[in-house]
Amino acid sequence: MQKASMVRSVQSLWLLYRWEKKRLKTEIEKKRRKTEIEKKRRKIEFNYSHETRKRKAEITSRVEINATDSATDEVRSWNLQELDRAALSRPLDETQQSWLLGPIEQKKKYVDLGCIIVSRKIFVWTVGMIVFAAFVDGFVTLIVKTVPRHHHKHPPHDNYTLALHKALMFFNAQKYLNDTSGVKSVSGKKKFMKKLK
């Protein structure tokens, strides 16, 4: 009974997760599409304003050549300014709107890892930190392995230490020679005596 309720709760959580993931994706897509449409609209408006500026420059150059009266020049420039405002506020026709709503090729802002959706910025920072940590770890390991270790060598033995060592070997040999059960052959005793010398 408990297993069935746990399975149902896990399934409901999974469905809730999938629904939330889908909702987030659609919300992100709507925002992205909205910003893309706004960018394209600004671009079109800029192109229209650029064209009107060109026309205005052409007309003013003609006016300067043909005009003799400064009053007519002012009136014509005033009319050109009105024309510029009208070009900017002009509604878009169907072809321009369809171009605005066309397919969008833009870099995704989120990365779907299967179990979680992460923003691209956080994903890049996480991967970068892991790579940086691995690099630092490898660098430290390289330094530790290549730097020589300083083993302290024993100082050379003085005469007192050498004499003590020989005396101990002599007493051990005496004990060894008196104990015949430890050595099975005479040749073993001879080898040991040679070692002493």
Image (cartoon, rainbow, N blue to C red):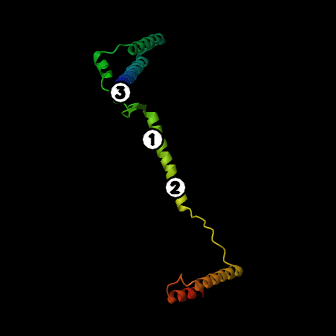
The answer to which of marks 2 and 3 sits earlier in the sequence is 3
State how far apart marks 3 and 1 are (Cα): 38 Å
Residue at the spot of label 3: 3
Instruction: State whether residue 99 is above or below residue 115.
Output: above
Q: Which numbered mark, 2 or 3, is in the foreground of this view?
A: 3
Query: Regarding mark 3 in the picture, which secondary structure is present there?
Result: helix
Q: What percent of the width, then of the height, locates residue 75?
A: 45, 10
Residue at the spot of label 1: 127
Instruction: State whether residue 1 is above or below residue 183.
Output: above
Residue 114 located left or right of residue 164: left
Q: Which numbered mark, 1 or 2, is in the foreground of this view?
A: 2
Residue 174 located left or right of residue 26: right
Q: How dense is the environment of label 1, judged by Cα within 10 Å: few (below 14), some, or many (20 and up)?
A: few
State how far apart marks 2 and 3 are (Cα): 49 Å
Q: What percent of the width, then of the height, locates residue 118?
A: 42, 32
The answer to which of marks 1 and 2 sits earlier in the sequence is 1
Q: Amino acid at mark 1?
A: Val
**Pointer 2 with pointer 3, Cβ within 8 A:** no
At horizontal 56% and vertical 62% (from top left) the residue drawn is 147
Query: Regarding mark 1 in the picture, which secondary structure is present there?
Result: helix
Quadrant including the C terminus: bottom right
Q: Nearer the viewer, residue 131 or 91?
A: 131
The image quadrant of residue 76 is top left
Residue at the spot of label 2: 141
